[in-house]
Amino acid sequence: MTRALLLISAVLLTLAPSSEAAQQQKKITACGITYLVPAGLVNVDMQALDSESGERCLLAFKWSGKKIKSYSGPPLDSDWKGLVDIFIEIKNQDLAATAKQEGFNLNEASKDQPRYSDKQGLFLLHKLDQTQLNNGRMYKAILDAQNKTPVMVRTGLHGKVVFMAGNNSKSASYTIWINKEDKSQERASIEKIFSSMSFK
């Protein structure tokens, strides 16, 4: 009996680390794509802002109770290569509904309005120059933001939108545009960013 108990204990100890590791990540499906994301993330919203064409889908992920400890992801001029032309501080997570209500077009705004605040002051738009983008300041600005969460960056290459939080925030959002035509690439991009975050 004792040997049997010891054997069972040994098996349980062997399995424990792998079970714990498995709990660190989970699969979620959104906009027709399945992602492997940190277990602390919760999918809270899926909306199609560009609902007429059906080409893109807006994903919003949220994690709570944890702070972003660090980010070691790709700089803006590599994986996120392209024209990043908008920096927005979001004070309301319901971006899609707000944008529709205000009749606010992000593409037009980036060209015609270097700075824009909606009627209720929910978000503020700034024009960025290429110098700021190439030296990686944008990620630093995102991670150093305090009490201004989430922050939004739009890349012109694929129309991606990213929400990230300041490292003092315990409740944050992450949002990205999905190009349905290239799901495998989008999945890789999203999972790479998630895997580049560490929490405390």
Image: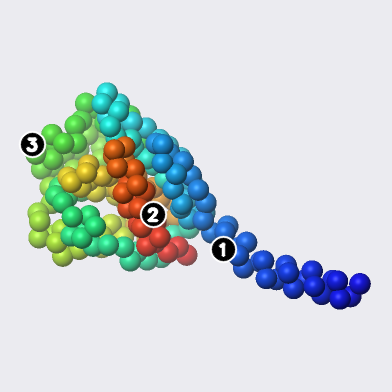
Q: Label 1 to label 2, Cα distance in Å? A: 17 Å
Image quarter for residue 123?
top left
Q: Label 1 to label 3, Cα distance in Å? A: 48 Å
Residue beneath disc 1 = 21
Image quarter for residue 120?
top left
Quadrant housing the N terminus: bottom right
Q: Which mark is residue 112?
A: 3
Disc 3 element: helix
Q: In front: 124, or 188?
A: 188
Q: Which mark is residue 191?
A: 2
Amino acid type of disc 2?
Answer: Glu
Q: Is residue 121 above or below residue 195?
A: above
Disc 1 element: helix
Q: Label 3 to label 2, Cα distance in Å? A: 33 Å
Q: Is residue 51 something that shows in the picture?
A: yes
- Could you tell which of marks 1 and 3 lies nearer the N-terminus? 1
Of circles 3 and 2, the one toward us is: 2
Amino acid type of disc 3?
Answer: Asp
Of circles 1 and 3, the one toward us is: 1
Q: Quick check: 120 left or right of 8?
A: left
- Could you tell which of marks 3 and 2 lies nearer the N-terminus? 3
Amino acid type of disc 1?
Answer: Ala
